[in-house]
Image (cartoon, grey):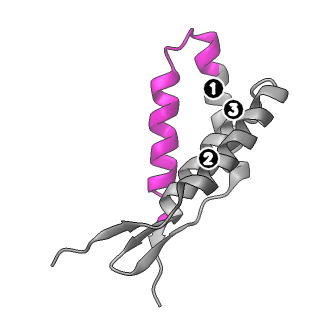
Amino acid sequence: MKQRINFTGGFGEYFIMSLGLLLLSVITFGLALPYWVYWSYKYFFTKLAIGGKYVVFTGNFGEYFIMSLGLLFLSVITFGIALPYWVYWSLKYFFTRMEIEMV
């Protein structure tokens, strides 16, 4: 049996928040960049509904921020060589902390 996946988010909400987080990232010289990525992933994943049940994200920002900042720093000092690992780790972090709500 197949279940349809629906996305319930809206572009306006995402766009306004992303502009604000972009501005914050510029003001903080990039320190807010991990939060922007975190918020974006969380926004898309928690707006998914599978068979009428929503996806719940169980991770937390503190854990993500520390590791992400370290991997971004590593990417800078390796001239971008570690950047693919940061992307891989970020996606893995979110996918392994998702659950489907049971009502």
Question: Considering the numbered disc 3 on the image, is that residue within a helix, a strand or a loop?
Answer: helix
Left or right: where does residue 98 sit relative to residue 4?
Answer: right
Asked if the stretch drawn in magenta spans residue 93, the answer is yes
- Quickly name the residue at label 3: 69
Q: Amino acid at mark 1?
A: Leu
Q: Look at 25% across and 74% down and name the residue there.
A: 3
Left or right: where does residue 73 sit relative to residue 83?
Answer: right
Left or right: where does residue 48 sit relative to residue 78?
Answer: left
Give the camera-side residue of 32 and 61: 32
Q: Quadrant of residue 26?
A: top right
Q: Quadrant of residue 12?
A: bottom right
Q: Amino acid at mark 3?
A: Leu
- As displayed, is residue 50 above or below residue 36? below
Few, some or many C-alpha atoms within 10 Å of disc 3 (few <14, some 14-19, many ≥20)?
some
Which segment is the magenta one?
74-98
Can you tell which of label 2 and label 3 is closer to the viewer?
2
